[in-house]
Amino acid sequence: MRKSLFRGKSSRTKIYTVITAVGLVLLLGINLLLTYFGGRGMLFLDLTREGLYSLSDRMVESCDELMDLPEGEGITVTFCSDPDVLVSATATRIVYYMAMAMQLEYDNFEVKTYNIRYNPTAVSAYKTTSRSEIKYNDVIISYGGKYRVINANAFWTQSNGVFYSFNGEYKLATAIASLTAISQPKAYFLTDHGESYYDPKNPDSEMSVENAALADLLTECGFEIRTASLEELVKIPEDCAMLVINRPTEDFSPDESSFNSISYVSPTEKLDRYLIEGGGTIIVNKPYDTEPLPVLEAFLEDWGIAFSPSYVVDEENELDLESSDGKTFAAEYDSSEENFGYTFYGDFVGLASAPKMVFSDTGYLFCAFGDGTSRHESGYDNTNRTYAHFICSYDTATAYTAENALESSPSAKALAAISARTKLDSYTGETSYAYIFATASESFYSNEILGNSSYANYDILLSVFRNISRTDRYADIDLGGLSGNSKNRGGKILTVTTLSDSDRTLIQNGKSTVYDGISGGAIGAYTTVIALIPVAALVVGAVTFIKRRFL
């Protein structure tokens, strides 16, 4: 015979039994809801002293203006790993939760995650070149057709592999400011040293027409083209992402009459400051047959780039069959992955039908550093200037002096070169760059060469210019930015710099290591909160039992 659940019980007992059953159901329901919203909506308590899992008031205040975008437009942050992988390591977890907090705060901010190990093509649109590599702890911030790829470690301030502050808000806000800035980065043509340039105010002029292909290339890179007189500028504008010096015929000599003026800055000093202070990029094309320009050449040699006055001939790789003088020829794609240029033309290596990069009526370049290709920059720590051949002729090429005398036996000659200034910031662990890209051809940027679709010049240079131009420098934001002079160097300073209670690592990227776990203080706080629930239930139960039994 089945007995009733409440048979033989008092009314009070029946009520307590019902309340207990309902309470258990509610507790289970609350647990399911918390689990669901915690996983999807970031429902959690930020118990870190630094507020690592919350947006600061200053961040919200700054982003309120940044996220005021035209209707239908928004910021997308793409992570290259699944959420469970992201939250399993501190460095990526906090960046991920910061992005999720932004998604909750702004309707036009979206977070996406892809597992690029199983779906590498999901982020192929964000590769600058076909050989670019996006790693699974990279973060991609995009807006429209523009994007920034930032490694998760770069959101932290670190020293010797130890994280000591989270600077992610500054990093994210700066990227958003850069992507949404109304002003375009500029490419300036210098005009006051006999250069050949494109004048956007007079596009139909003979000189502008001659440089139309180069202007198209710069426009496709995202630049707004302008002209500038170096003599008239106090300094090169901050919005200058690329400075073009094309075929100068006059030297960059200083004004000797102004030497007594404290405020006077020589032309080459302006160039140097632009590269050092602004992390800029200069494009120099100095044909081999121009008159010597000792001041400009001395400046370039200080950056490792030297020009030969001889010209290069390669009859075996001649392309102009009508003249057959060997002055218009194809360059060789270096198959060594250590070569700087391999990043840009690596896909062409070994392909018999691949388009060639062509040079016509060109000289050659060589390293001015003597024995080595790199030189430490005096006055700066962790700073070097490094020369690299970008692309060379085949070893069948020969060089001739201006008098048509054979200069040397056949050998490969550098037809384009790059000098890179690298500076390692000891506070952030990040490296900043400045570049000079140099060629020595009268017609390298001509419509006949650059505008010929059967050559690879346009595509390769498009990739080069996008990589070496500092297009994100024109937009910045003051949000806890790093400063060697500030007391805390910006960011959210960690009270516990050891982010892990173990030595396990879940993500490794070269020399950078992301540590697993959270701070000891946060672990203690979470444990206390979680333990309070059963302890409170136990205490209430004990009091109720004693009261009913003995009182």
Image (cartoon, grey):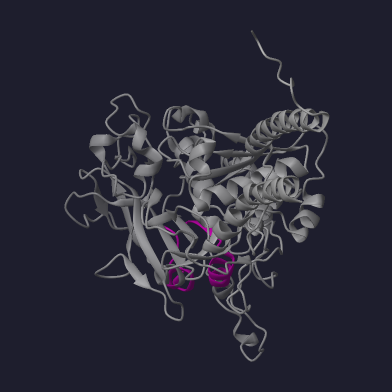
Query: Can you tell which quarter of the image residue 492 is in?
Result: bottom right
Picture quadrant of residue 406: bottom left
Residue 449 placed where, x, y %?
Answer: 46, 37
In the picture, measured across the screen, residue 245 lies left or right of residue 373, that is right
Q: Quadrant of the N terminus?
A: top right
In the image, taking residue 290 as reference, residue 351 lies left or right, namely: left
> Seen from this angle, which residue lies furthest left?
409
Front one among 506 and 488: 506
- Relative to 477, does residue 36 appear above or below in the rendering? above
How many labels were placed on the picture?
0
User: Can residue 186 be seen in this snapshot?
Assistant: no
Q: Residue 304 colored magenta?
A: no
On the rendered structure, is 283 left or right of 399? Answer: right
Q: Looking at this view, is 359 or 242 the one in front?
A: 242
| Image position, residue 104 (x, y; %) | 74, 41
Determine if residue 173 is in view: yes
Magenta residue span: 271-298
Q: Residue at x 69, y 73 (%)?
A: 234
Image coordinates of residue 115 in percent, x first then y, are 48, 32
Who is closer to the viewer here, 33 or 151?
A: 33
**Camera-nearest residue between 403 and 129:** 129
Q: Is residue 224 above or below residue 28?
A: below
Residue at left 80%, top 56%? Answer: 61
Q: Residue at x 49, y 32 (%)?
A: 124
Find residue 335 and report its image quarter. top left
Q: Is 291 covered by the magenta stretch?
A: yes
Q: Residue furthest bottom?
A: 260
Q: Position of residue 523 (x, y in %)?
A: 55, 57
Residue at left 43%, top 40%?
A: 132
Asked if residue 25 is positioned above or below residue 237 in the image, the reply reads above
